[in-house]
Amino acid sequence: MEQEIDDLMRKFLDKDESDPYRFGDKLAKIGSPEVREKLIAVVKGGDLDNAFLAAKILGKMEDNAEGLNAVLEVIHSPANRGKNGGLVSLLEDFDLSEKFVDIFRIYLFGNFKAYSLAKEYLDYTEFTITPRTLKKAEKHLNHFLNNAGNEEWFELKKQEAEAILREVVELLSKD
């Protein structure tokens, strides 16, 4: 089985392969911890094209929380800040209900595509939010406010972010 997985991974990551998803779908069907570990290693490997492919397949697998954490780690990496929109688009394939703070961070610090997608997730995902979650989000908002430049979009994003957190506070106070 390990040889089969290695062969599928090699074909899946072959840059000359015209349809890598054909092999990725087979990997997702196997869905073993070994496959998950190999795909997570690819996500973290530094090649964003391969990371995108691997994240797409991780999103199709059962029990993909570890994969989600790896994808978020790569998205949050400062080295990827300007080019992580593709990975952010794949987050829709994962359960984001426990990831409010991560999505809020992407909203605050992401490029235009990442920010726009994060806003959509914030608007339409049902998150599990606790007072601790809110404190973490407020910490990231304060970091954003203290470190943002004088970009033309700053004031708008600030107002939107503050409104999001106000809504969260209102929801928490109702519970």
Image: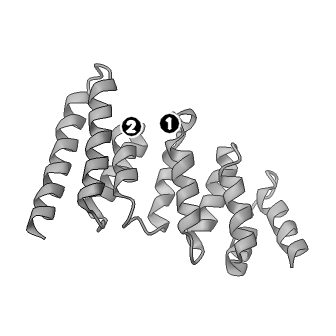
Q: Residue furthest right?
A: 3
* Residue 104 position in % (x across, y down): 33, 48
- Residue identified by numbered label 1: 81
Name the residue: 69% across, 80% down.
29
Percent coordinates x, y for residue 9 in the rendering: 80, 64
Amino acid type at mark 1: Arg
Mark 1, other Cα within 10 Å: few <14 / some 14–19 / many ≥20 = some
The picture quadrant where one finds residue 41 is bottom right
| Furthest-top residue in this view | 150
Q: Determine the image quadrant of residue 23.
A: bottom right
Residue with the mark numbered 2: 109
- N-term-proximal mark, 1 vs 2: 1
**In the drawing, does residue 90 fall left or right of residue 111?**
right
- What element does badge 1 sit on? helix
Quarter of the rendering occupied by the N terminus: bottom right
- Which of the labelled discs sits on residue 40, or is there none? none
Q: Disc 1, disc 2: CB below 8 Å? A: yes
Neighbour class for label 2 at 10 Å: few (<14), some, many (≥20)? many
